Image (tube, coloured by chain):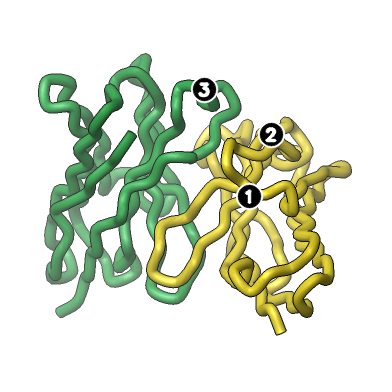
């Protein structure tokens, strides 16, 4: 199982970016898929989840600005980020669990992350 | 401020044991056994080392063990090795209507 993120970059405050997470040897619609971010030198912060059944949730810090979605035909998870702020600067990981462990709700599969920098 | 509270740093000598605490509330750590620990080496993605409070994924050393009492979870690493030097994060799946997963602020383990 492999996850590969892309789409990060440098954006001005108020700008937008769309992150992508392509899954291999795994179907994104079969399990919960999350975005977790890590600001430089800081800890992990859960951002959003899209469950297999379609339920979606967001952290309060991004609610109303970020949108999680998936394209089953492309086996890809997305994170549309609008109205970006400097405190959104972070390495964004796509994360999920293997089928064996998913009933315990861990993140045992992680991508390598894609860096988002919000700065003027 | 992180939802779960961990010490910022711990240290130990090779061969010793250390314990990292993780304090939450009755809506996260205290609510379920969905408590996890992650190890993160510099410039690497986190790796799950404990799930369901005390279970180790396949391939994780028996030297890592987890426990929970009330709203506080703990990670113990026995027989410290140089390769254990890393950041450790606790996490919990929560009953909150907003934040479904919460993390601790992380603990830097230094092997002296």
Asked which secondary structure carries label 1, the reply is strand
Residue at image x 81%, y 50%? B72
Residue picked out by circle 3: A100
Residue A23 relative to residue B83: left or right: left
Q: CA distance from mark 1 to mark 2?
A: 9 Å
Dot 3: chain letter:
A
A32 in relation to B75, above or below: above
The residue at the point 72 percent across, 52 percent down is B64
Q: Looking at the picture, how far across and down is residue B74, in whole percent? A: 79, 53
Palette colour of chain A: green
Secondary structure beneath disc 3? loop
Q: Position of residue A40 (x, y in %)?
A: 38, 74
Residue topped by disc 1: B37
Report the side of B101 relative to B16 (left or right).
left
Quadrant showing the N terminus of chain A: top left
* Residues at marks 3 and 1, CA–CA distance in whole angstroms: 17 Å
- Supply the letter of whichever chain is yellow: B
Protein chain holding label 2: B
Q: Earlier in the sequence, mark 1 or mark 2?
A: 1
Snapshot quadrant of residue A54: top left
């Amino acid at each position: 199982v492999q996850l590969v993120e892309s789409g990060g970059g440098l954006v001005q405050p108020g700008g937008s970016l769309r992150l992508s997470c392509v899954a291999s040897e795994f179907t994104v619609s079969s399990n919960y898929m999350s975005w977790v971010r890590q600001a430089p030198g800081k800890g992990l912060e859960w951002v959003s989840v899209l469950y297999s059944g379609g339920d979606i949730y967001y952290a309060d810090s991004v609610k109303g600005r970020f949108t999680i979605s998936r394209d089953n035909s492309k086996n890809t998870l997305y994170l549309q980020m609008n109205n970006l702020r400097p405190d959104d600067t972070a390495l964004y990981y796509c994360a999920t669990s293997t089928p064996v462990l998913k009933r315990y709700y861990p993140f045992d599969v992680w991508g390598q992350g894609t860096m988002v920098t919000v700065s003027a | 401020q992180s939802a779960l509270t961990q010490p910022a740093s711990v240290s130990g000598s090779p061969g010793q044991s250390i314990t990292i605490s993780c304090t939450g509330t009755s809506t996260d750590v205290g609510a379920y056994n969905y408590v996890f620990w992650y190890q993160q080496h510099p410039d690497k993605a986190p790796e799950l080392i404990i799930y369901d409070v005390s279970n180790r994924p396949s391939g994780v050393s028996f030297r890592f063990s987890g426990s929970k009492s009330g709203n506080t979870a703990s990670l113990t690493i026995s027989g410290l090795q140089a390769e254990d030097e890393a950041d450790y994060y606790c996490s919990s799946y929560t009953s909150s209507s907003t934040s479904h997963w919460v993390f601790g602020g992380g603990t830097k383990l230094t092997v002296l």
